[in-house]
Amino acid sequence: MHICLLDIDGTLILTGSAGHAAFAETLAHEFGIAEMNGDVSFAGRSDRAIVIDLFRHHGIDPSVENWQRFCRSYLGRLRSILAARKGRVLPGVEQLLNALSSRGDVALGLLTGNIREGARHKLSHYGLWHWFPFGGFGDEHTERCDIAAAALAAAKTHLNGSHPSNGSQSAHGEVVVIGDTLHDITCARSIGARCVAVATGHSSIDDLRVGEPDIAVETLEDIDAVVAMFPRD
Ligand SMILES: [Mg+2]
C-alpha cells in the first residue's frame, strides 16, 4: 500500500483566511490583544508554533494552560468564521482524491499544521473530512518534520489495523507528501518521502521549485502527473 499525505490550507482548500481571522479574534477576546502581530508567519507552520510566537510577541505566558485556553476559544469561533468567509475547495482536489482512492493501493492521510479539531472543522465545512482516516496534526509539535513523522506513524498504524495478519511491521510502498510551501518539501524529505508541490497557496511554482520537489504543478488538476507518483505493483 502506498501512502499519500496531504496538507490542508493552500493545498486542499482556501478558507478565505478563516483560520487567520479566528486566531485574531481569539487573541482579542480571550487575551485582550487588539491587533495581532502581522510579522508572524502562518504558511506551512504548525498552529502550536504560530501561537507560541504570537504569545511571545504579545507578552502572553506560553504556558500549556494558555495554549489550551487558546484552542478552546479558537475552535468555538472557527466554525462560524468558516461559514462567513468565501472559501473553496481547490481545483482538481476532489477528482484527485477520487482517482487515488479508487486505485485501492493508496492510503490517504493528512499532514497539517492545523490542530486536529481545527482540521476537522475546516475539512468538514468543505465536505472533505471523510477522505482522511489518519494524519499528523499541529496540536503538540512545533516543527513540521515532527508532524510528518507522526503522520507516517499514524499511517503505519492505520495500515496494520487494516491488515492485522501482516503483524506489527507491514511494509508500505511509496510515501508521497503533497503541499503548497517549501516547509512541506522539507518535511517530506525528513521522512524519506517524495513530494508534490502545488502552487495554489501563497508560493508560486518558481518559488516552490527552489525546494526541488519531485514534481511541481500549478494546480492538482494535473491529476495524471500526481497519480504517476504511485507506481503500480
Ligand atoms: Mg499549506
Image: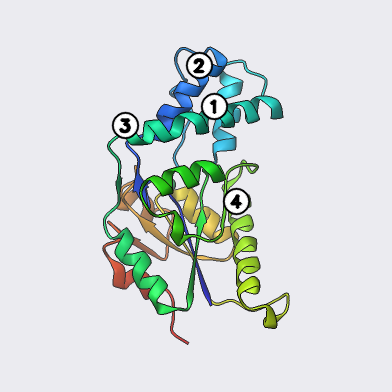
* Element carrying mark 2: helix
Establish if 159 lies above or below 152: below
Q: Is residue 32 visible?
A: yes
User: Mark 2 highlights which residue?
Assistant: 29
Q: Please name the amino acid that badge 3 sits on.
A: Ala
The mark closer to the camera, 4 or 3, is 3
Rendered location of residue 188, percent (x, y): 53, 59
Q: Earlier in the sequence, mark 2 or mark 3?
A: 2
Can you tell which quarter of the image residue 56 is in? top right
User: Mark 4 highlights which residue?
Assistant: 147
User: Mark 1 highlights which residue?
Assistant: 73
Can you tell which quarter of the image residue 159 is in? bottom right
User: Mark 3 highlights which residue?
Assistant: 84
Judging depth in this view, the residue of 209 and 66 nearest the camera is 66
Can you tell which quarter of the image residue 22 is in? top left
The mark closer to the camera, 2 or 4, is 2
| Residue sitting farthest toward the bottom | 233
**Pointer 2 and pointer 1: residues touching (CB < 8 Å)?**
yes
Q: CA distance from mark 2 to mark 3?
A: 18 Å
Circle 3 crowding by C-alpha within 10 Å: few under 14, some 14–19, many from 20? few
Circle 1 crowding by C-alpha within 10 Å: few under 14, some 14–19, many from 20? some
Q: CA distance from mark 2 to mark 4?
A: 29 Å
Q: Residue at x 40, y 53 (%)?
A: 210
Q: Please name the amino acid that badge 1 sits on.
A: Ser
Q: Residue at x 58, y 66 (%)?
A: 192
**Pointer 2 and pointer 3: residues touching (CB < 8 Å)?**
no
Judging depth in this view, the residue of 45 and 212 nearest the camera is 45
**Pointer 2 and pointer 4: residues touching (CB < 8 Å)?**
no
Q: Residue at x 73, y 75 (%)?
A: 168
Q: Please name the amino acid that badge 2 sits on.
A: His
The mark closer to the camera, 4 or 1, is 1
